[in-house]
Amino acid sequence: MKNHRSQLLVPELTKLSLGKDSLLDNERVGGVITVLKEIYEGKELKSILYLYLSTLEKFVAQTSMKIEHCGVLSSSSIEALQSHFEKTLERRLSVTVEYANDLIAGIRIFIADFVIENSIAGVLSAYKKSMGSK
């Protein structure tokens, strides 16, 4: 299969891999891989699977939101943050929540290449940088 045809096929495979919630569905991904193995083989299969994996990794990075916190974070606060960023970014997000001792107080949010810092540790770090100390 030529590279151009693979590049047209992989986005469609990615769409087939999404569940009703517009996030990746493990069963659907497995189904796509099973069908690809039935149709292609050798270098052609390897090439398609490589492009498919690369596309899925990018998709997961764009649809994942990690919230770090050091205090109590209620489920309603998590849902409010998720809702806010889904509306802002116009896409569904898969949320993970982790406890982080280094924050002192507040939260830190990671979405793709974005980091939103709202913690005392972040304020102190920015202050240290502005003062020229490490």
Image (cartoon, rainbow, N blue to C red):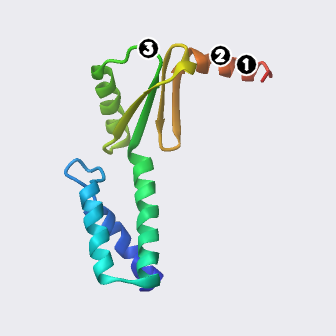
Q: Which SS class for mark 1?
A: helix
Looking at the picture, how far across and down is residue 93, in whole percent? Answer: 34, 41
Q: Residues within 10 Å of mark 3 (few under 14, many from 20)?
A: some
**Quadrant location of residue 42?**
bottom left
Residue at point 51% right, 21% down? 118
Q: Please say if 125 is above or below 6.
A: above
Marks 3/2: CA–CA distance:
18 Å
Q: Please say if 75 is above or below 15.
A: above
Q: Earlier in the sequence, mark 3 or mark 2?
A: 3
Looking at the picture, how far across and down is residue 124, in whole percent? Answer: 65, 16
Q: Amino acid at mark 3?
A: Gly
**Quadrant location of residue 55?**
bottom left
Residue at point 45% right, 55% down? 58
Q: Which numbered marker is on residue 71?
A: 3
Q: Which numbered marker is on residue 124?
A: 2
Q: Earlier in the sequence, mark 1 or mark 3?
A: 3
Residue at point 45% right, 76% down? 46
Looking at the picture, how far across and down is residue 109, in whole percent? Answer: 47, 30
Q: Please say if 44 is above or below 86.
A: below
